[in-house]
Image: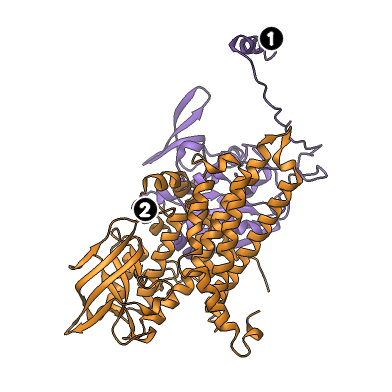
Chain colours: A purple, B orange
Amino acid sequence: MKIVVPVKRVIDANVKVRLKSDGSAVDSDNVKMSMNPFDEIAVEEAIRLKEAGVAGEIVAVSIGSDACQDVLRSALAMGADRALLIRTEAVLEPLAVAKLLREVVAREQPQLVICGKQSTDGDANQAGQMLAGLLGWPQATFASKLDIGADGATVTREIDGGLEIIAVTLPAVVTTDLRLNSPRYTTLPNIMKAKKKPLDVIALDEFGVDTRPRLTTLGLAEPAARSAGVRVADVAELLAKLKNEAKVI
Amino acid sequence: MDFQLTEEQIAFQDSAREFARHELAPYAAHWDEEEVFPKDTLRRAGEMGFCGLYTPQQYGGLGLTRLDAAIVFEELAAGCTSTAAYLTIHNMVSWMIGSFARAEVAEQWGPALASGAKLGSYCLTEPGAGSDAANLRTRAERDGDVYRLNGSKAFISGAGSTDVLVVMARTGGTGAKGISAFVVPADLPGISYGKKERKMGWNSQPTRTITFDNVAVPSANLLGEEGQGFTFAMKGLDGGRINIATCSVGTAQAALEAAARYVQERQQFGQALAEFQTVQFRLADMSTELVAARQMVRLAAWKLDSGSPDATAYCAMAKRFVTDAGFKVVNEALQLFGGYGYIKEYPLERHLRDSRVHQILEGTNEIMRVIVARRLLQDGALETLR
């Protein structure tokens, strides 16, 4: 069984995100970039399926500039077999990403696509679902447990108010939640081996897919800064403030 | 000329940083307080590739450059100075055995050392031979197909908890040329270990004296030929000096980051400390000196990698400059924490205690000056030392 895992290059989770001084975009110049954490979980899950003898080949895919090769190398160092970069300088919306991934699926013929449930930059939480819709495949989103059986997959989903267990036939799209697994460290020997694994680059234009944006960004604003706390003299004052000012009790 | 790390070096750095953040930093205070030698963590470091960074690949190492190793050790030291420093010593041992031992001995020990399954100690210093190392008195007498080792070694990192020792001992006459180096299994009959030294820092690794009483070492365990031991020991130390210097950089970076965060939070006289220009200037100097120190390490590592005839002098310069600068940055960071810098709930006093010894070992900073001066006073040296 072949698995395709899309990976996105985002601002590292340990970086404090800022807007550019003119407010036009999030400042990503000279900022540490990493693989989207949910995609890391997706890569890890695919490798575990391979180690369990369920999966054969794992193909990591990214869409973006040449700089995205670093997250593909990370996926290869974790244990993916091949990587594919769809090169573009444009920032794509989830629908465009899903359309491109549909083309990748047509070429690669995987039985399973494992995506992060969302990227930590756009937080759209749409690409996986749209891909399933375009392919006409079942989708199992927010997975916290994934079991592949003879006739499909059993997926535990994290939903509001608890867990839901569903069965899907394959091929399918699964999106990962935080508790699916803990991604392994990339070891130095594996980083060195990853250099020799194939990484193909294809220009976005070659896919002949309409990736034009459907949305217009009107403006960006930073969240309000946290204001300083206040000291209360005693419990009575605390209760009064919670009741009258914060209105939470 | 390009100061940018390669894509692979950045990946190594990220890998080491992740490991340090999750596997070292959270435990460093406990290991210091309880004097724990974290062998399980060292084993995991071995799985990561950190136990044989520049050991030859044929003996289980990664065969990386000293520059690559410096980048990795810096990140590990930011997590736990003492444990990272032991790892650098282990790497030195692993490299010496992989590079200079006979094939059967390198095959026996190399892969086990490079994977962290076995640990090593480097045994040069003696109670009566510290800076004057070439005057060491431990003797190795040829007796049939063994050498009989007699004497004692002092301040040996890891001693009593490691599996193999690289021991410098005298097989010939006085001076450096009479010294040979041996691979000595740590549990051979006749080896005894002294009590664990109580130290100011570096508490996650035991330090002991080792006494050799007629210890029979197979003659095949000789590194190279008789009389080459001091040369091997000094080659090991060139890299060792870069490693210790880079541990100072990592520790100072951790201290600087802690201080920069703290002064933005700590309010006095109605404003954050960071709003006082005197604090800003101090941070600016700390950062400037740390960047200079880091580049000095990388220059020396590159000189060693490229086989420069001046590598020894550059390694000595780097060790002297960087361990002094690193200690100063840590001390300044502690000062910015005020009283909190002095109490053990914060890591600053540990950073200070751990990095202080870097000015003393792998050759004191005074001996570093001797090495640099000896080279620079040779004819034409100032043409190349620049």
Q: Nearer the viewer, residue A30 or B222?
A: B222
Q: Which mark is residue A192?
A: none
Q: Which residue shows up at 60% across the image and 59% down it? A: A69
Q: Quadrant of the N terminus of chain B?
A: bottom right
Q: Give the letter of the chain under mark 1.
A: A
Query: Which of these two is toward me, B101 or B310?
Result: B310
- Locate residue B165, reporting x and y percent: 30, 68
Q: Is residue B212 left or right of residue B120?
A: left
Q: Which residue is mark 1?
A: A244
Q: Quadrant of the C terminus of chain B?
A: bottom right
**Relative vertical location of residue A203 with respect to residue B372 in this rendering, above or below:** above
Q: Label 1, secondary structure: give it.
A: helix
| Residue linked to disc 2 | B198
Q: Residues within 10 Å of mark 2 (few under 14, many from 20)?
A: few
Residue B154 appears left or right of B80: left
Give the camera-side residue of B117 and B358: B358
Nearer the observer: mark 1 or 2; the answer is 2
